[in-house]
Image (tube, helix red, strand yellow):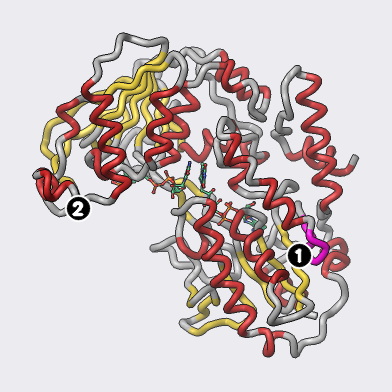
Amino acid sequence: MLRVAVVGSGPSGVYAAQTLVQQREVPGVRVDVLDRLPAPYGLVRYGVAPDHEKIKSLTGSLRSVLEDERIRFLGNVEVGGPALPVTRLRELYHAVVYCVGAAEDRHLGVPGEELPGVHSATAFVSWYSGHPDAADAAFDLSGVTSAVVIGAGNVAVDVTRILARGVPELTPTDMPQAALGALAASGVRAVSMVARRGPSQGKFTTKELRELGTLPGVGVRVRPAELALDPAYADPGAAAALPAVARRNLEVLRAWGAADPDPAERDITLRFYLRPVEVLAGPDGSAAAVRFERTAPDGRGGVGGTGVYEDVEARLVLRSVGYRGVPLPGLPFDPTTGTVPHAAGRVLRAGRASVGEYVAGWIKRGPTGVIGTNRPCAKETASSLLQDAGALARREPGPDPLDTMRAAGLRPVLWPGWLAIETAEADLGRSLGRRSVKIPDWAGLLGAAGS
Ligand SMILES: Cc1cc2nc3c(=O)[nH]c(=O)nc-3n(C[C@H](O)[C@H](O)[C@H](O)COP(=O)(O)OP(=O)(O)OC[C@H]3O[C@@H](n4cnc5c(N)ncnc54)[C@H](O)[C@@H]3O)c2cc1C
Ligand SMILES: NC(=O)c1ccc[n+]([C@@H]2O[C@H](COP(=O)([O-])OP(=O)(O)OC[C@H]3O[C@@H](n4cnc5c(N)ncnc54)[C@H](OP(=O)(O)O)[C@@H]3O)[C@@H](O)[C@H]2O)c1
């Protein structure tokens, strides 16, 4: 038997576990999927926007993997802490696959970034997704009329959309009741999503972009003057060389730029060629506006400053400029890339492959890629592990790691505990006249798991 620990139950962890038990070259692989949270699925539960029910329903296929009899879910188990350091975990399993994601937000590095009213999209997403680490967060949107979202990726589109959505569309989601209440009381009428580069260089995908134009009661505005392309792509022949997604995005943006919509209940304005230089405080010391410098394409895909500045009013500023991996104590970490150094998924220690230690997902590749991108990534890693199986299996398996974890003071939440959380969330929803509603705090989750 080969006993493997997969650390992290997001898509990469689940796909790694699935590959390991479903292959036929190495018989008898058993996998424990450990997660520091009592609930599985990583960012599929705590990142994918609550109004994207179709993507959320992917949990159905992740669930069927975790219910495989050769796989065991152990939630509420933090790896790298005093109760379960990396070295101890290595002793308990023949191999460990780290799939811990990239949970931290990135900063802008501009003055005023720490003012009240400025938040990371990561914090905002965690709050409306009911992540238990965000249980103390509170977004009072009642006095906010205009918001600025900095960045042009799919997360920026997500948070822009959630800010612009009406309560009738949010109520059927599993959003925690307090977040729903705060969004219901929101005074936000104008959201500007601001990109430092041009319209062909947005990182968002067309489906997500286009959806902004379908929101009830929402108008989308684009300034035609900001739709100019980098000179490298300005003539029609060169424009054809743009990646297909950029061309499709441009079509959508140009259509919005050509329309002149009447003022709507809420407006989204997409801005380009503006880079943030400072968040300005109002008389109360909170964020009141973001100062941007207009940029111009440099002909090589980048932009340069022009010395022209524009202030965009905002009582709420969300920076949505990407995620970052967090070092796990005891595991090598490259601070430049925010990833664990690896070769085909094998962790590199001092430049050499460490047999028995592997990585997959965002902590391996960096924080880009959709859920599906993690499948081939996890497969590559699993295949490296399976190639090493002969060497790994020489060690006799010790006692059940679950006993060791309990003896170390950990209180793992097993699959029935997770199912009890699901039931409690369905009950909570029913009591509120809604569908299933997330329990947003540690005590509530652990209480439900134990009931
Ligand atoms: C806000 C947001 C929205 C997104 N929406 C979509 C979308 O709509 N569609 C789409 O295709 N893609 C979406 N993505 C991308 C997708 O979520 C990622 O590609 C994917 O989740 C990455 O998978 P992962 O397994 O590497 O990391 P994660 O999903 O982050 O999973 C990591 C897991 O590791 C656990 N963990 C971390 N540290 C430890 C530790 N020390 N011990 C034990 N466990 C630990 C975490 O609790 C977590 O469960 C979104 C991403 C974000 C940030
Ligand atoms: N529905 C979905 O499929 C979905 C939803 C959410 C997330 N995701 C995926 O999850 C991954 C992460 O998404 P993400 O949006 O966090 O990251 P992302 O796609 O990397 O986008 C980050 C954005 O931030 C900008 N940026 C970075 N530093 C900046 C700075 N200092 N000032 C101003 N702008 C700055 C980038 O601009 P530059 O390009 O100029 O660097 C880019 O527009 C992506 O792969 C995404 O597709 C998918």
Q: Earlier in the sequence, mark 1 or mark 2?
A: 1
- The numbered dot on residue 114 is none
**Which residue is denoted by mark 1 in the rendering?**
32
Left or right: 51 with respect to 316? Answer: right
**Amino acid of disc 1:** Asp
Left or right: 413 with respect to 329? Answer: right
Residue at left offset 57%, top offset 69%: 379
Mark 1: which secondary structure?
Answer: strand
Spatial separation of the CA atoms under disc 1 and disc 2: 47 Å
| Residue 259 is covered by the magenta coloring | no
**Image coords of residue 250 (percent x, y):** 26, 37
- The numbered dot on residue 241 is 2
Category of crowding for the residue at label 1, using alpha-carbon neighbours closer than 10 angstroms: few (below 14), some (14–19), many (at least 20): many
Give the magenta range.
68-74
**Amino acid of disc 2:** Ala
Q: Quadrant of the N terminus?
A: bottom right
Residue at left offset 52%, top offset 61%: 363
Residue 277 shows in this picture: no
Mark 2 and mark 1 in contact (Cβ < 8 Å)?
A: no
**Image coords of residue 39 (percent x, y):** 73, 46
Does ligand 1 reach within 8 Å of label 1's beta carbon?
no
| Residue 92 position by quadrant | bottom right
Mark 2: which secondary structure?
Answer: loop
Tell me if residue 391 comes above or below residue 269 in the rendering. below
